[in-house]
Amino acid sequence: MTVNLLDFDLEGLAAFCEQLGEKRFRAVQLFRWIHQKGASRFDEMTDLAKSLREKLPSVADISDLPVLSRQDSADGTIKWLFDVGDGNAVETVFIPEDDRGTLCISSQAGCAVGCRFCSTGHQGFSRNLTTGEILAQLWHAEHFLRKHLNTSDRVVTNVVMMGMGEPLQNYTALVPVLRVMLDDHAYGLSRRRLTVSTSGVVPMMDRLAQDCPVALAVSLHAPHDALRDDLVPLNRKYPLSELLDACLRYLPAAPRDFITFEYCMLDGVNDQPEHALQLLDLLRKHRGSGVPCKINLIPFNPFPDSGLTCSPRPRVLEFARRLNDGGIVTTVRKTRGDDIDAACGQLAGDVLDRTNVAERMARRRDSVARPIRIVRTERQA
């Protein structure tokens, strides 16, 4: 049985090479071929010793995820649906902008957190993805985009772990992924351009600060515990006071001097003037000096059976004005890819309906041939 080399960070790959009787520099060569050049066959790796090239196929492979579909949004956003087996699929979204290309990556098939406003949470949880399955999303997208844009330059400049799943509930697989993304022999992302989003798994936030601190985005969505208990069930285990304490502990190790808080705007639920005042009070006064932060307001993307609707645009802007006037930098996220269900909160894959799996996947495969179109758009404020 072969091992998938996408499952290894550089240290893991070096250990694997040592088991084969090879020196560490061979691992660096392999790492560069896989991640910088997108090689999937060992006979392409021309600077490896011939003996190693002949040895590797019997013990290792480089396994991409099967693509069930690729969809193009009118705004240039691209969504891939990847098959991860047993009727499960995960989604990955690329968002092109003038000065960056952001890839939104999934960490689980489904999600166990069950936030009311998230379609992924409504489908339930299937399983954690492996390190290789998470990395394959970046590996596939980066080298696919280079080929279709006819460039050797890096296309994906930012990665956000904001796709399907709660990344910090798949911590063992996540950390090697982050290390590969940061490694100069692989993708060379800066810590500021790599963001992990969490609904507030407090113990893992503390571990991430020690093991691999990157930019942190926290799904907040409510200004007090009673409302957050309803919207984000994890709050019953880690209430707001504990979550904000964890944010303060994270900041000394973070690449930025603030935490980003995500706040989904829900009509009549969390979008009233009193909610804005309560949110200001919470974030400015916690532990006396408050939590250094920025707030990202996210227009809710409706999905069937949610029972929720998006706040009207004027109310979203008024909410943002109150927060900005109160001294907290606040932006309103531009909705991207909503025509292909790629917008925030819409990623649900094909896990929800487990019936007629073979027929459904065949339809997805038939749609792959749709031509790709990249559209550059103005950067989100």
Image (tube, helix red, strand yellow):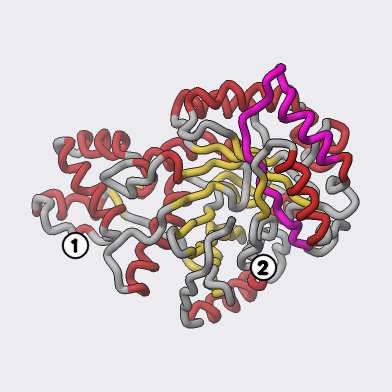
Q: Which mark is residue 44?
A: 1
In the image, what residue occupies the spot 77% across and 29% down? 282
Using the rendered image of the protein, determine whether residue 21 is visible from the camera's viewpoint: no
Q: Residue 47 vs residue 105: left or right? A: left
User: Reading the chain from its start, which is encountered first: label 2 or label 1?
Assistant: 1
Q: CA distance from mark 2 to mark 1?
A: 39 Å
Region rendered in magenta? 275-302
Q: Position of residue 349 (x, y in %)?
A: 64, 61
254 or 347: nearer the viewer? 254
Residue at position x 61%, y 58% from top? 88
Tell whether position 299 is magenta. yes
Where residue 324 is drawn, which disc sits there? Answer: none
Q: Quadrant of residue 225?
A: top right
Residue 188, horizontal then vertical, whole percent: 33, 46
Q: List x then y, in percent, for residue 134.
A: 48, 50
Q: How many marks?
A: 2
Label 1 is placed on what type of residue?
Glu
Q: Where's residue 312, x and y in %?
A: 83, 61
Foreground: 22 or 261?
A: 261
Q: In the image, which disc is placed on residue 338?
A: 2
What's the residue at 87%, 33% (across, down)? 226
Question: Helix or strand or loop: what does disc 1 sit on?
Answer: helix
Single out the mark in the foreground, 2 or 1. Answer: 2
Does residue 204 show up magenta in the picture?
A: no
| Residue type of the residue flagged with mark 2 | Asp
